[in-house]
Amino acid sequence: MNSKSNNEITRRKFVKTTGAAVAGSMIISPAFSNILNNSSGKKKVALVGTGSRGNSFFGKFLKEEYGDIIEFVGLCDINKGRLEFSKKNIGVDCPTFTDFDEMLNTVDIDLLMVTTVDATHHEFIIKGLNKNIDVVTEKPMTTDEQKCQQILDAQRKSTGNLIMAFNYRYGKVFTKLKEIIETKEIGDLISIDLNWYLNTFHGADYFRRWHGIRDKSGTLLLHKSAHHFDLLNWFIGSDPVEVYANGALEKYGKNNSFRGKNCRSCEHTNKCEFYWDITKKEKYMDLYVANEKYDGYLRDNCLWREEIDIFDKMSVLVKYANNVEVTYSLTTYSPFEGFRIAFNGKDGRLETHEGIPWRNTENEDQSKLHEKEMDNSSHTRIEHKFHEIVTQRNFKDYKRIEFPYVRSGHWGGDKLMFDEIFRGENLKPSLNHAADVRDGSLAVLIGIAARKSIDTGMPIKIADLTDLVPKINKWG
């Protein structure tokens, strides 16, 4: 018998049964004891990389939400114009540096935050660890296996800890999925299908920026998919052992008949569907355009430029040490933004989706979706929609959950991640949200292996890339 009243958990019921518990059940997490045990007053934090993410999440948001327990002691970037803008925008009064070594050698730092171009992450992570400083890095941890090994070696010698900013793990809907998996509602996992869709606003924007160059981003299999690969590793609780992938560049880059220097100076704006007017974004004009003279970086670069050498379509097969198998795909020019994920267990199936237009009750402005995801200012606001989560045990009827929808701040994960890092607070420490150097390594190693597989046409063994030995039980 299937009854909506019996099988559906409404948003009102969810809030009623969980809201009261939140205030009184916050558990202190031991995951970041180095930072939390520092009793010298406010934690001294320094930031290297003052682009958009450094300014927003690791800058202004961090100062506003955690200013009672942290203080900025240094900002570093190779672009002195961006540095000066960032100091004002973040609202800090600290020294600025264009030389990272100078900052590291002259400033007392408890925690270093790395938000530079992906291919340079290893340089700053290693130097921080060599100084026995705790380091938080944006994803991906790095972009190739040699750099990954160098980071692993540095971590083993350091008393500082590398912390991965895997905020997706903390996202409320993903935490709910993890909880359901842990209850064995569908039995032991046997496979996961994950399809991620970037729309023609968000997906296209990667190809305007430095991310379109493999030597800087490692391809989107590293820059974007590291989030997804880490989620998969975390859901499964085991380590990947083998990867096979296909991919190509078939839409962007040299695949168009015309191109320009950048959108502002382009003569094809009247016929280019991807024309983007950066002059309408005041912050980007102040952060990027005003400072092009220092490093030549064009934030509104042409996504048809011939130097683009990353993939714009990707499909990946991953086998895990516990025999779970994953099928994954990333699309970069979908008409809509969202994902589908399904967990197949020995005793049933769990699935959910987001952003599929014909499953929604109302249409969303596709050009604004990524801004909403990145917006930290309303991270606690529960929106009018819900995530539809469905479980079904073999030979039983399905159960449908209407889980409260939060899109802002990476599904609410941004704030929750920093709450654990800086305040030691986590409502569900048994779920192992905190991510370390091993987690960061295994997420990028899937992407590195996938890239190598596409290039060679061969499956790639994870154990052949670094000295990490895949474990059947990630936390065993």
Image (spheres, helix red, strand yellow):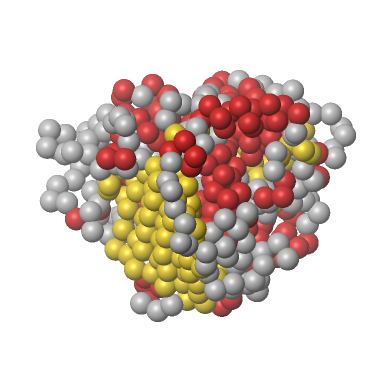
Point 37% across, 76% down: residue = 456
Q: Is residue 403 visible?
A: no
Q: Is residue 434 left or right of residue 357?
A: right
Q: Where's residue 24, x and y in %?
A: 76, 29
* Residue nearer the viewer, 355 or 215: 355
Q: Where's residue 441, x and y in %?
A: 60, 61
Q: Is residue 157 left or right of residue 190?
A: right
Q: Is residue 458 left or right of residue 278?
A: right
* Residue nearer the viewer, 203 or 157: 203
Up/down of 186 relative to 115, above or below:
below
Q: Where's residue 286, x and y in %?
A: 42, 24
Q: Where's residue 325, x and y in %?
A: 48, 69
Point 85% across, 40% down: residue = 37
* Residue nearer the viewer, 360 or 248: 360
Point 68% across, 51% down: residue = 432
Quarter of the view holding residue 27: top right
Quarter of the view holding residue 412: top right
Point 39% across, 51% down: residue = 340
Quadrant where the C terminus is found in the figure: bottom right
Up/down of 28 relative to 392, above or below:
above
